[in-house]
Amino acid sequence: MKAQYYICTMSVATLQVRLDGKLKSDAEAFFTSAGLDATTAVRMFLRQVVIRQKIPFDIVADPPAEDDPFYSPANQKRLRESIRQFETGERRESQLIEA
């Protein structure tokens, strides 16, 4: 019985990405610790996008600066209450008047 060999041919494409230098070095440090290189990690990501037909992880914003008063628990509570009041009709939009 003679062995048969099949050659799989696939086209190769190049992907270039511009990104922040610190992000690149931080990511490469992680990939190295995981036994990967950046090319393999990106290839894994793209393969999962194709398989799942979606981004394979939750996308979250950077955590807000802790000293930003907008994100304080008291302000967030007040904003939620204001939204509730608008949604229930307890409060209506008002016009800004320049003095």
Image: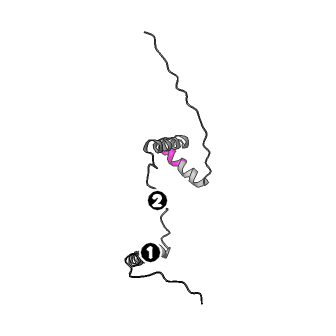
**Label 1 Cα crowd, 10 Å radius (few <14 / some 14-19 / many 20+):** some
Question: Residue 82, labelled with which disc?
Answer: none
Q: Is residue 10 left or right of residue 48?
A: right
> Which region shows up in magenta?
28-33
Measuring 51% from the left and 45% from the top, which residue is drawn there?
Answer: 31
Q: Quadrant of the N terminus?
A: top left
Q: Give, as a three-letter code, the residue at label 2.
A: Val
Q: Position of residue 65 (x, y in %)?
A: 50, 69
**Secondary structure found at label 1:** loop
Between disc 2 and disc 1, the foreground one is 2
Residue drawn at (44%, 48%), measured in percent from left and top? 56
Nearest the eye: 28 or 52? 52
Mark 2 burial class by Cα count in 10 Å: few <14, some 14-19, many 20+: few
Residue at image coords 43%, 76%: 79
Magenta residues: mostly which secondary structure? helix
Residue shown at 49% from the left, 83% from the top: 94
- Residue 15, percent across and down? 60, 43
Query: Can you give x and y, in whole percent of width and height, for residue 43 in the image?
Result: 52, 41
Residue labelled with disc 2: 60
The residue that label 1 is drawn on is 72
Q: Earlier along the polypeptide chain: callout 2 or callout 1?
A: 2
Residue 26 percent across, percent down from the top left: 54, 52
